[in-house]
Amino acid sequence: MSTVADKLAKKSSHKTSAKQVRLRLVYIDFWSAVKLSFLAAIAIAIVTVVAFVMVFLVVQTTGLIAKADEFFSSFSDGSILLSQFVSFPQVLAFSAVVALLNLVVVTVLGAVIAGIYNLAVKVTGGLLVGFTSN
């Protein structure tokens, strides 16, 4: 008695001829590029905020901020302290601002690249891409 797995193994044992197709990419839809670049920008924004917070926590845990405060107070009257400017809420706010700016820039950049590609296709004829079926 043969099982489904045996039938599938028999089917995959004989080679099928792979058909190759060469297609030319001649247009990138503007809104698709904007949506995809926006999703990529959201991922980059999340990574940015997490990276800022992790770096701050490492710097705070190792005591580098306290050492920098000591360094600044050694040549000033002690009125300038780095810990006044670098705290968790300030780092979180700064990382959120950087993430929002990145979000806008990456989204616009994706749209601009799609537009430039669509203009360049008129000169170059597009990107030749090969596909094969297994």
Image: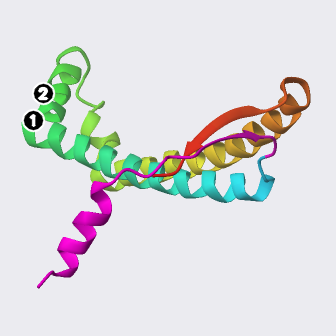
Residue range of the region highlighted in magenta in the rendering: 1-27
Residue furthest to the top:
75
Residue 5: image location, x then y, percent: 19, 74
Tell me where residue 115 sits by quadrant. top right
Disc 2 is placed on an element classified as helix
Residue 100: image location, x then y, percent: 56, 52
What's the residue at 9%, 43% (across, down)?
A: 61
**Which residue bears the numbered disc 1?**
63
| Label 1 environment density (alpha carbons within 10 Å; few <14, some 14–19, many ≥20) | few
Disc 1 is placed on an element classified as loop
22 relative to 107, above or below? above
Closest to the observer: 51 or 44? 44
**Which residue bears the numbered disc 2?**
67
| Label 2 environment density (alpha carbons within 10 Å; few <14, some 14–19, many ≥20) | few
Classify residue 113 as left or right of residue 133: right
121 relative to 133, above or below? above
Closest to the observer: 25 or 96? 25
